[in-house]
Amino acid sequence: MEEVKEHKARAKASKKEVVIAIKGLKKSFGKKEVLKDINLEVHTGENVVVLGKSGEGKSVTIECIVGMLIPDGGSLKVFGDEVADMNAEELKKLRMKIGFLFQSGALYDSMTVRENLEFPLTRVLKLKDEREIQERINEVLEGVGLLDAVDKLPSDLSGGMRKRIGLARTLIIKPQIMLYDEPTTGLDPITSREISELILSMQKKYKTTSIIITHDMECARITADRIMIMNDGKYIAEGTFEALQKSKDQIVKEFFKDIS
Ligand SMILES: Nc1ncnc2c1ncn2[C@@H]1O[C@H](COP(=O)(O)OP(=O)(O)OP(=O)(O)O)[C@@H](O)[C@H]1O
Ligand SMILES: [Mg+2]
């Protein structure tokens, strides 16, 4: 009996569940067709990197995932439920499970780092236990290596530190899904690398399922289990970094041309 149970448990653990399922997704703005036919399945604990030229619709895709934009066609399910069919209450619940690091991930400038981090805990999760709140703040700041900054204002921090605090603020609610929109843009190579490694450690530590949009090929190399290449409203190639690096496709080659 025990053996059967154990076998079943093991079988379940090895079968990766689909967390995000996108089929034939379409989205236009006026006459401009941005998403033409997006198809993607992201599995539990997987890091999927999306590469694509500026204006391709990478941000639009993840804005559809969190229900900020309503697609014109196709299907987009998160945890098995169609996002476009969700009511306000259901969307709110979904967003509590998703961490979204915005491309322009701004902090509240008049609040200290501690206050910035308290905000999602008290406003989103409605936590009241002061000790738990402070413990979570310490844990997440330790994770991004910025415990010392807890009483500072964002204006006292460097751009890279602000990015890390932005990341901490997203991670503090322990989201099952993380959507990173250009997490390393505007950072020096060393800080970019630190952020990329942080993304990787979040995946390992919390089994987070992530989509990472980036133009930074080092970030893609470090974080990706799988890369999707977006072109003209569709994904035209997918594979590991190493596999795509060997691709003969002209569009794919363009992304890897400066990689040694
Ligand atoms: N809310 C909106 N209303 C109208 N047009 C929009 C809206 N959001 C995005 N667009 C348009 O959709 C297209 C894709 O935008 P998106 O921000 O997704 O590009 P991107 O791939 O993220 O580019 P980048 O790499 O520069 O961030 C652009 O032409 C943009 O102007
Ligand atoms: Mg974008």
Image (cartoon, grey):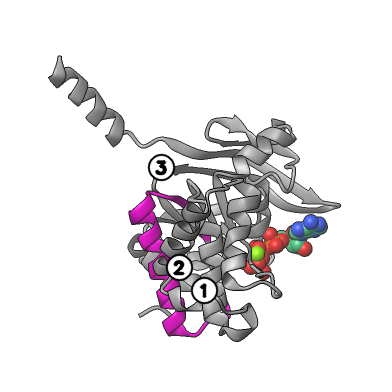
Q: Secondary structure at mark 2?
A: helix
Rendered residue at 50%/67% (across/down): 250
- In the picture, the disc for residue 44 is 3
* Quarter of the image with the N terminus in it: top left
Disc 1 under 8 Å from ligand 2? The reply is: no
Q: Quadrant of residue 34?
A: bottom right
Rendered residue at 61%/66% (across/down): 115
Q: Nearer the viewer, mark 1 or mark 3?
A: 1
Mark 1 / mark 3, whichever is N-terminal: 3
Q: Which residue is mark 2?
A: 141
Q: Which residue is mark 1?
A: 150
Q: Residues within 10 Å of mark 3 (few under 14, many from 20)?
A: some
Judged left or right of residue 56, residue 70 is: right
Q: CA distance from mark 2 to mark 1?
A: 8 Å
Q: The disc labelled 3 sits on which kind of residue? A: Thr
Mark 2 / mark 3, whichever is N-terminal: 3
Q: Secondary structure at mark 1?
A: loop
Q: Note whether residue 192 is visible.
A: yes
Q: Which residues are magenta?
A: 184-212
Q: Main secondary structure of the magenta part?
A: helix
Mark 2 / mark 1, whichever is N-terminal: 2
Question: Is mark 2 in CB contact (under 8 Å) with mark 1?
Answer: yes
Rendered residue at 64%/67% (across/down): 105
